[in-house]
Image (spheres, grey):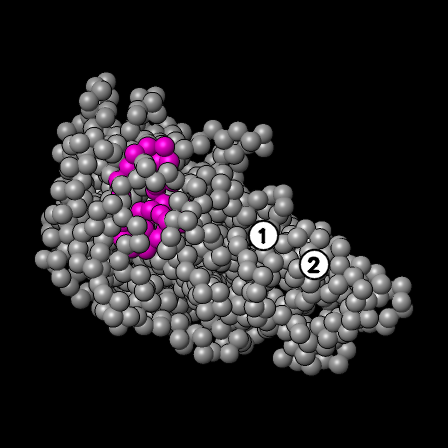
Amino acid sequence: MEAYYKEITDKIQKIAYKLLDEGKVDKIIGFGKGEFTDEVTPVFIVNKENVDKLLFSEKATPFLAKYLLNYKDEKVAITAKPCETRAINSYLSENLLQRENLIIIGINGCRGIEGNTACKECDVRNPVISDYTVGEELSDEEVSSMITNVYEDLENMNPEERNEYFQNEFERCTRCYACREACPVCYCEECFTDSNQPFWLDSSTQLKDTFTFHLMRSIHMAGRCINCGACEMACPENIDVRALSAKMYRAGEEIFDYKPGMDPEQKTLLAEYDVNDQEKGFLD
Amino acid sequence: MNNNENFEPKIVAYLCNWCSYAAADLAGSSRTQYPPNIRVIRVPCSGRIDPLLLIRAFNFGADGVLVSGCHPGDCHYLDGNYYARRRFVMLKELMTFAGIEEQRVNFTWCSASEGSRFGVVVKKVVDRVKEVGPWQGFDNKGFIGVDSSEEEGELTGGSIL
Amino acid sequence: MLKVMNEKELKQFIDKLNNDYKVAAPVKKQQGKQEILEYDYIEEFEEIHLEEQPDKSPKEFFLPQNEVLDPEAIAKSNPEENKTIIFGVRSCDIEALRVFDDVFLDDTYVDPYYEKRRDNTIIIGYSCPHREPTCFCDQLGISPHENKLADLYLYKFDDKYWIKSINEDSEKLIKDLADGDEDLFDEKLKNKKDNFGESDFKFNMETPIPEEKAFNAPIWDDIAEKCLGCGVCTYYCPTCFCFNFFFDEDDKENQKYRSWDSCMFSLFTKHASGHNPRETQGQRWRQRLMHKFSYHPQNYGGLSCVGCGRCVKKCPVTLDIREALKSTEEYLKDEGGAVVED
């Protein structure tokens, strides 16, 4: 596996060098090693001499696509895992980025990131939008064979047990907002938690407030969450932050046959309607 | 869940101005008998309902919520209730998954002429919420028998002082 | 006073303390997929885990994340009933208390809540057994081996525990233990210091960092480019103390609360007019670093960073404060003017 990732790293560096050399982009956003640690961290390359900092491996935990929102008017290239390409599609469909300004180096056949449980459920392992690709694609059969249902136990519990589980998890939330900041689809300029008028919730870490925060955040992302797992990787307390949003992802698929981020022209789930939508859960 | 015979739930009802609120009004002027547990909030359209409003109602002490709008196809604003329909389906999925009893969160369509039906709907909602008892809060933790305030008190320095 | 114990005697020592005081120490807890090491009150000696740096500092014991501000209750409370001992605190976290004392026990205003807690807590330090990859306390003038600000200090050499008292009050806690040989102790301590290893990161700047030069440096946007703007570094930092007030809407008595706030949040400095003097993440990062290495030393005389490395460990994108310091040092060196010692 190491040799495979080394190969991908070399290819990425070559593409990056070419792009900077030809002046096609001003900046490359990618993964790199920290100077004093072995952790993989985002790097921003502007000189072609520095492309040897770029790499890709199974430890590439940060989620890079969100940084694109900081460079809306510049020409940037980005090394993107398949889930990140879905986030890029979401941005394009919501008119946050211009396609001409982007060069996407997609990673084919993503085998998953270490420690990210979302990768175990992932069914989109090849980029959905890209200008260059590196690595070997995975076929549909291979992809389906890699899927496990991470939340099977949680789904089978009754509601009281689930409530208890969530209360246990959210009790240690420190309201650091790492999940919100790491999330690619959470990009409101003023988040509802900071809103004063109207005032939605306290900034304390009492359980009633932390539970409400996670519940409210999940419903805001319904239909846009791409189930990438950036939230749970960012959480410093190892809280199962992804559980609620993953449910929204599954509900979108099962009830409305909808997968976010597959197409740059696609509208988000709740921005559209069908006159024949079903009314699951309504009073009869 | 306790089935306290004297429990009178507090239900917050968001009614759309053009159909459901008119239905409630008609129920009133026709002297329809229905339970007094609902507190009505009039909104222009069911599509205006932000899911946060419903979650906030629980934080303020509501035991259940009811949202009622025009029938799909009859929205005064043409398609507000279509958007609302999708939103409510997703919200209900999320809330039942998070462990909030599904009887507490109720959505329906009620047209302006359905005054007596409105009374029936309210009675049904009140019965459903009575089944599941009072809302204990997002931090009830009654199940595992731990008093959460005591645990927090330790680290918030309550014991040092 | 220097005493020595074996592990059994240490257990008896802790159990005896547990009778008279509330003892808190680093314990392992299962959280989700991983185990975390944090300070909590203990019942049994076996719960204590001293081998690794705890994920959380004992900051919560002195500045809780949420706190009711009730001046009457504070004035009436009798803390003698609840004297606490925090056992196994490393040098970095002990030094952090100096920073808190600077700020909360300032001559002009003494924070009564902090004061009560600080006066009623005894700190037993623990000499770090080994360097972690993210530690750099010794680069900032703090010794990982001992710290004079603790009341008692525990050292482990081979399988014996040595304990030293720093002041008279703490002597009475250990006076019944067996005396330790001073020369043997010095030899073992020197041996440990010689074999402790060096950090990869070298800090060569003279502090306080020159304020104007560093403030106007063009380096901050690059340093903060990958910063997400969450509050993880500030919440886990043992010296960060910023807080915000609020009134809990559910509280029938409508009391005032305070809870932690973070300068990394984008709305931290937003004025009611709508103007935000720190609009970019680069400006906010500049504030964080300058506060720790320039403003606090100017105001109080010591650094406000203790080199514990938790911000590096916990950051979701591993933004390394050491790399930021290195960039600052390189810029200042190039610019000349700032005294940079070799």
Which of the two residues, B75 or A126, is positioned nearer the viewer here?
B75
The residue at which mark 1 appears reads as: A201
Q: Is residue C157 magenta?
A: no
Q: Position of residue C158 (x, y in %)?
A: 15, 63
In the figure, C141 relative to C237: above or below? above
Give how far apart the Cα atoms at labels 1 and 2 are. 35 Å
The residue shown at (32%, 32%) is A74
Q: Position of residue A143 (x, y in %)?
A: 26, 67
Chain for numbered disc 2: B
Q: Return the mark for residue B66.
A: none
The residue shown at (58%, 49%) is C257
Which of the two residues, C257 or A112, is positioned nearer the viewer here?
A112
Chain for numbered disc 1: A
Pointer 1 local density, CA inside 10 Å: few below 14, some 14–19, many at least 20: many
The quadrant of the image that shows the C terminus of chain C is top left
Q: Is residue A72 magenta?
A: yes
Q: Return the mark for residue B74.
A: 2
